[in-house]
Image (cartoon, rainbow, N blue to C red):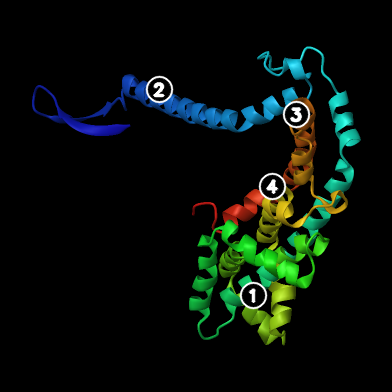
Amino acid sequence: MRVEMVRTDRGVPSRELLVAPSRGRVERATVRRIVHGVGIYAVLIGIAWCALAPILWAVSASLKRDGELTDGALLPAHPQWSNYREVFELLPLGRMLLNTAIYAGCVTAGQVFFCSLAGYAFARLQFRGRELLFVAYLATLMVPLTVTVIPQFLLMRAFGWVDTPWAMIVPGLFGSAFGTYLMRQFFRTLPTELEEAAILDGCSTWQVYWRVLLPHARPALMVLAVLTWITVWNDFLWPLVMIQRNEIATATLGLVRLQGQYTTQWPILMAAAMILLMPLLVVYAIAQRVFVRGIAMSGLGGR
C-alpha cells in the first residue's frame, strides 16, 4: 500500500490511500510463476524418462521370452522369473559377483586412504613446488585410458601378475588424480583453527590428519568411495585384457560370455544385467544422503 498527496477541487491538499497493485498484475505474476514451475518440472521429467527408459526396457525384457522382445509391450503377459535362475545355471555369476565385490572393495579402500593423504598434503602442507606438482598431477586426467593400457599390461606381465587378482587390485590401489583433487578441495574448506589448535596441543602432522581433519571429511570420503566402487564395478576393458579364467573373472566379463557366437538369449542376458545393477542401486540408496551432501560441500556441485 502507498500513500499519495492529492488536491481537492479547492486546491487544499489531502491524504488519500490508494489501492496497492492491481488484481490483473498479481494474476499475471502468478501465471508466470505457474508456467515457470511447470516448465522446470516438464524438463526434469523428460530427463528422468530418458535415463530410466532403457532400465525399464531391460527389466521388462528380462521377464519375457525370446519371441516377445519385439512385441512392443512394456509389461510381459506372463513374466518368466525362471530367466534369473537360468543365469546362474549357465554362468558362475555368484563367484563373479564376489570377485567383483572384492576387487571393488580393495581398490575403494586404497583410493580413499591414499587420495585423502595426498589431498591433505596438497591442501595443508607447505613445500616448494606444491602448486606446480599438483597441476602436473591433475594434468594426467587428460591422458586417455586406452593410452595407458599397454604400458600397464607390460608392467603386470613383468611382475608375473597377468591373469591374477593382483592385476585387478594393484593398479588402482594407490590413488588417482580425480580423488586427490576431490579431497584437496574439501580439506581447503575446513577452518585452519582446527589444525592450529591441534598443533598447539602437541599433535604431529599425522595426528592432525588422522584424528582431527579426516573425521570432518566423511562426506567427501563417501563421495570418493561411491564413485570408485561404481567405476571398478562397471569396469570392462581392464578385466578383458588381464583375466582369462572364470574363477577370477568379473561380472562384466560374465555378461560378455553369455553372448553366443551366432545367437544370444537376450532375456537371460538382460536378467544378468539386472542382477549386476542391483548392488549399485543398493549402495547408492544407502549412501544417497551423504553422497549428495559431500558433492555440495566438496565444490563439485557447481558452487
Binning the other alpha carbons within 10 Å of mark 1 as few (below 14), some (14 to 19) or many (20 upward) gives few
- Local secondary structure at mark 4: helix
Q: Mark 3 or 2, which is nearer the eye?
A: 3
Q: Earlier in the sequence, mark 2 or mark 1?
A: 2
- Identify residue for label 2: 31
Q: Earlier in the sequence, mark 4 or mark 1?
A: 1
Residue 217: percent from the left, percent from the top? Answer: 67, 64
Q: Earlier in the sequence, mark 4 or mark 3?
A: 3
For residue 289, the mark is 4
Q: Nearer the viewer, residue 51 or 264?
A: 264
- Identify residue for label 3: 264
Q: Which amino acid is tagged 4?
A: Arg
Q: Earlier in the sequence, mark 4 or mark 2?
A: 2
- Local secondary structure at mark 3: loop
Tell me the distance, in whole angstroms, between the alpha carbons under discs 4 and 1: 26 Å
Apparent side of residue 187 relative to residue 274 in the rendered image (left or right): left
- Identify residue for label 1: 194
Tell me the distance, in whole angstroms, between the alpha carbons under discs 4 and 3: 39 Å
**Residue 155 seen by the camera:** yes
Residue 218: percent from the left, percent from the top? Answer: 70, 61
